[in-house]
């Protein structure tokens, strides 16, 4: 009975995540959502930049702290290990939902190339960025990354195999292709308002800091194999591998 409840909980967390992911695409792209980064004022623009920074900071703190191995060791004393990942995914989704709901658009325009060839290219690049993110999750086991695999294995009463060090496709070019996809999506817009610029700048800064924390965890977990991978494959700027590596890459731990 408990295993079945864990499974249903994991599925519910995943569905909340996926709905949140789709809303994020519409939120930053100003498409098909009632409230976006540039529309749907929540209390006006007064002190909007401060409120937006607080919302971004809350997400960044939650997302980074709960991803750290030290926190996980403490957290799994309170939360059963099979649903630890699902709970992390749920909390991250709730932090994003709060950001979407309370976000204050700042409508001053930085650039506007809508209706031009450049605007079309930026729109296409925007969706390409999100496509890289989604495709990248499937390269490294999408369902494990978002907690479904863990609760499914628990339902079947099977042991979860330790994560393997593999290097599929994008991971032969950069160590963090998901983060590259996010950065592309954050900055590719034909209409860049000050509010969107604040989101893009702060989120990119967070990504660059979070990668450093993530890599420390990966070195501790994979040891010399990951150190060697760091020497041979660029961190975030796509570049040819420095030399052929017979080992593997890492799944994202975030």
Image (cartoon, rainbow, N blue to C red):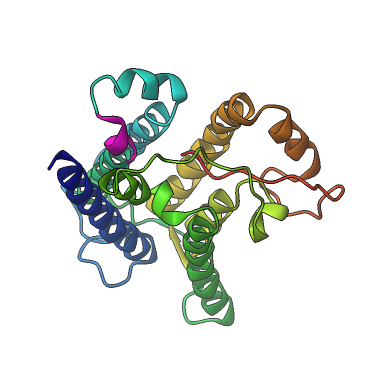
Figure disc tally: 0
- Horizontal and vertical percent position of residue 66: 37, 29
Tell me if residue 203 can be seen. yes
Q: Looking at this rendering, what residue extends furthest in the right direction?
A: 243
In the image, what residue occupies the spot 49% across and 73% down? 123
- Horizontal and vertical percent position of residue 21: 34, 58
Decide if residue 78 is on the left or right side of residue 195. Answer: left
Decide if residue 138 is on the left or right side of residue 62. Answer: right
Foreground pick, 150 / 69: 150
Foreground pick, 97 / 13: 13
Tell me if residue 51 can be seen. no
Decide if residue 238 is on the left or right side of residue 109. Answer: right
In the rendered structure, does residue 48 fall within the stretch colored magenta?
A: no
In the image, what residue occupies the spot 21% across and 59% down? 40
- Horizontal and vertical percent position of residue 90: 26, 43
Foreground pick, 140 / 128: 140
- Horizontal and vertical percent position of residue 234: 74, 45
In the image, what residue occupies the spot 73% across and 37% down? 230
**Numbered range of the magenta stretch:** 80-85
Image quadrant holding the N terminus, namely top left
Q: Quadrant of residue 79?
A: top left
Q: Looking at this rendering, what residue extends furthest in the front direction?
A: 157
Magenta segment, prevailing SS (helix, strand or loop): helix
Up/down of 32 relative to 56, above or below: below
């Amino acid at each position: 009975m408990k295993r079945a409840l864990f499974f249903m909980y994991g599925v519910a967390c995943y569905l909340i995540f996926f709905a949140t992911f789709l809303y994020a695409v519409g939120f930053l792209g100003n498409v098909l959502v009632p409230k976006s980064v540039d529309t749907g004022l929540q209390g006006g623009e007064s002190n909007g930049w401060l409120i937006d920074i607080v919302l971004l900071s809350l997400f960044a703190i939650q997302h980074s702290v709960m991803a750290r191995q030290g926190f996980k060791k403490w957290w799994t004393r309170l939360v059963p290990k099979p649903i630890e990942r699902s709970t992390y995914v749920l909390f991250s989704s709730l932090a994003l939902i709060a950001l979407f709901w309370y976000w204050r658009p700042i409508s001053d325009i930085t650039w506007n190339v809508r209706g031009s060839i450049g605007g079309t290219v930026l729109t296409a690049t925007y969706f390409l960025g999100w496509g890289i993110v989604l495709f990248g999750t499937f390269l490294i086991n999408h369902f494990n990354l978002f907690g479904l695999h863990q609760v499914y294995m628990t339902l079947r009463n099977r042991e979860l195999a330790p994560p393997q060090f593999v290097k599929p496709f994008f991971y032969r070019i950069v160590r963090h292709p998901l983060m590259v996809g996010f950065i592309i999506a954050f900055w590719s817009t034909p209409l860049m308002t000050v509010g969107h610029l604040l989101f893009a700048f702060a989120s990119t800064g967070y990504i660059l800091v979070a990668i450093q924390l993530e890599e420390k965890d990966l070195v501790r977990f994979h040891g010399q194999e990951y150190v060697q991978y760091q020497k041979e494959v660029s961190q975030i700027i796509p570049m040819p591998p420095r030399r052929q590596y017979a080992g593997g890459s890492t799944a994202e731990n975030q």
